Amino acid sequence: MNIQTLQTNNQKRMTSQQIADLVEKRHDNVKRTIELVVKAGVIVQPQIEDEYTQDTMGRPRTTQVYVFKGEQGERDSLVVVAQLSPEFTGALIDRWRELEAQATTPVIPQSFAEALQLAANQALQIEQNAPKVLHYDNVVERKGLLNATQVAQKVRLSAVAMNKILDELGVYNKAVKRSRVFQQWFIDKGLGEVKQTDQGYSQAMFTKRGEAWIIERLISEGVA
């Protein structure tokens, strides 16, 4: 058994059929919504796969489904559910968390040889990551975070226009005048982080979950 391959293949994924089951909508309606938001440029075109199931009579049938994978898939599926049934967005977030927990379940070696291979892989990974760890201690890590301009582009607004709306929604702390800083509730929900730039200034950065939250709110407000 190749341990590295096993870990790589254990990737979070969710199909349009699973989304339909979750929000209690017809699968064809879910697919139609996905195609509309793809056409609008709000989400990335998901992969199409054939899913083999049985009809009510037990006969085999093939259905084409859209597949959402990884962080991009998680973000895009949230946008789709926000269009279909905003009240189910929380349930979808919970489901992605379950999938993430399953994807990060440690691989248990099944033999002494596999245990040795796993130990060797981990030692090599630690050695390779040593310079990165040192860099992280000195430079703020921003991987996976988005600034206001990047998020605003997804909803076809300027950063100024989007930030004005977020001010009205109570996202930013108005007591801080020199720079934009998130309210603590926004940070506690994992929607954003405040980072330091190389020049020592505070910068409000959005997580992928925060981006999905903003898109959902703007859609519900009739802005996006």
Image (cartoon, rainbow, N blue to C red):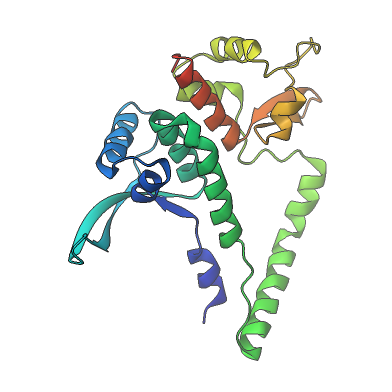
Q: Position of residue 98 (x, y in %)?
A: 57, 54
Q: Position of residue 117 (x, y in %)?
A: 64, 81
Asked if one can make out residue 117 in the rendered structure from this viewpoint, the answer is yes
Residue 224 in the image: above or below residue 164: below
Q: Nearer the viewer, residue 82 or 107?
A: 82
Along the line of sight, the residue nearer the viewer: 166 or 138: 166
Write down the quadrant of residue 7 in the picture. Answer: bottom right
* Residue at 70% across, 78% down: 119
In this rendering, the answer to whether 96 lies above or below 125 is above
Provide residue 79's location: percent of width, then percent of height.
Answer: 44, 33
Specify the farthest residue to the bottom.
112
Residue 224 x/y as whole percent: 43, 18
Q: Is residue 193 visible?
A: no
Which residue is at the front of the view, 97 or 195? 97
- Residue at coordinates 61% horizontally, 15% vertically from top-left? 166
Quadrant assignment, res 168: top right
Q: Residue at x 81, y 11 (%)?
A: 175
* Left-right relation of 201 to 154: right
Q: Is residue 157 above or below residue 77?
A: above
Q: Is residue 158 left or right of residue 17?
A: right
Image quadrant in which you'd find residue 184: top right
Above/below status of 167 relative to 183: above
